Image (cartoon, grey):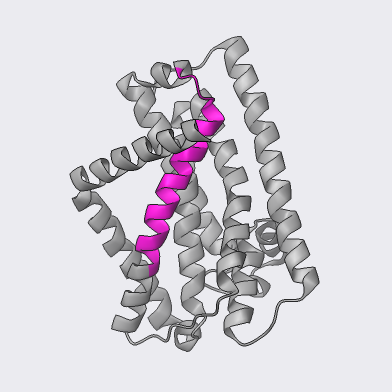
């Protein structure tokens, strides 16, 4: 536990330092997000829904969870420092967990402040209820399973990081962020319901509309997230074992 905390503090200092260096890129990304959100708010009938904003929070956090680990590993492989990560006394899974936790804490706080302020700025209602917090934590735990898969694929194939943006926008489309899943074609709706972000958004919006989640809702969300975590862990271990046996491609 002590080693984990030391690694976490070091990663937090590194991440904050990188944020200061690449501040313009972060501001640019936030402006792009604001434009995308504004288009959906003003062009659909859901803009007056006080629960609409929470879908964008889940999507932004999910995209960060998946993309940041891939981008970081890809950058380390390109700069030649990835080998040093492999030689650390802590496991690669622990390092990825620390990195993901670091990015998540910082970015989710920024996302909440940014999205709430932006929705209020454009005159869109913002609802809140305390059950949204545990729903979000369970959902993000499930998304960490997908993060493990993408991170391990990036370790094996560096260009995996190039697909993270596509996966992020696919989650926005399939997860019911912009339009309800029920309005999607049946095959896409079925694919969307497999993602942990989908029931997480649906439950959060139901809570913000004054509904109380049932025990079955909690069990289904927890079970789906647990399945993603276990599946992600198994895939991660298999890919890492394959990489140790057959080598890891360091070329970009």
Q: Residue 127: horizontal and vertical position, in percent?
A: 48, 83
Magenta stretch contains residue 105? yes
Residue that sits furthest to the right in the current view: 216
User: Can residue 65 be seen in this snapshot?
Assistant: yes
Taking the spot 35% from the left edge, 61% from the top edge, the residue there is: 110
Taking the spot 42% from the left edge, 31% from the top edge, the residue there is: 73
Taking the spot 28% from the left edge, 45% from the top edge, the residue there is: 16
Q: Which is nearer the eye, 187 or 106?
A: 106
51 vs 159: above or below: below
- For residue 199, side relative to residue 41 (left or right): right
246 vs 34: above or below: above
Q: Quadrant of the C terminus?
A: top left
- For residue 80, side relative to residue 152 (left or right): left
Q: Which is nearer the eye, 214 or 77?
A: 214
Q: Residue 119: horizontal and vertical position, in percent?
A: 36, 79
Say how many tags the image has: 0
Magenta stretch contains residue 169? no
105 vs 181: above or below: above
220 vs 67: above or below: below
Q: Which residues are magenta?
A: 88-112
Taking the spot 53% from the left edge, 32% from the top edge, the residue there is: 94
């Amino acid at each position: 536990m002590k080693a984990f905390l030391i690694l976490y503090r070091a990663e937090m200092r590194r991440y904050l330092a990188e944020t200061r260096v690449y501040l313009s890129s972060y501001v640019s990304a936030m402006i792009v997000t604001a434009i995308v959100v504004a288009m959906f708010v003003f062009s659909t009938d859901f803009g007056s829904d006080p629960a609409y904003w929470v879908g964008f929070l889940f999507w932004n956090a999910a995209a960060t969870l998946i993309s940041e680990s891939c981008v970081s590993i890809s950058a380390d492989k390109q700069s030649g420092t990835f080998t040093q990560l492999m030689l650390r006394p802590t496991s690669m899974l622990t390092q990825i967990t620390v990195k993901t936790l670091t990015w998540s804490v910082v970015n989710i706080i920024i996302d909440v402040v940014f999205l709430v302020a932006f929705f209020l700025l454009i005159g869109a209602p913002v609802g809140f209820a305390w059950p949204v917090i545990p729903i979000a934590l369970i959902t993000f735990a499930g998304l960490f399973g997908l993060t493990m898969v993408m991170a391990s694929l990036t370790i094996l194939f560096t260009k995996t990081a190039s697909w993270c943006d596509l996966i992020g926008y696919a989650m926005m489309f399939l997860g019911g962020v912009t339009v309800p899943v029920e309005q999607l074609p049946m095959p896409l709706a079925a694919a969307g319901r497999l993602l942990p972000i989908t029931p997480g958004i649906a439950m959060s919006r139901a809570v913000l509309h004054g509904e109380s989640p049932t025990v079955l809702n909690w069990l289904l969300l927890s079970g789906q997230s647990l399945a993603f975590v276990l599946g992600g862990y198994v895939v991660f271990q298999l890919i890492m074992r394959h990489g140790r046996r057959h080598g890891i491609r360091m070329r970009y």
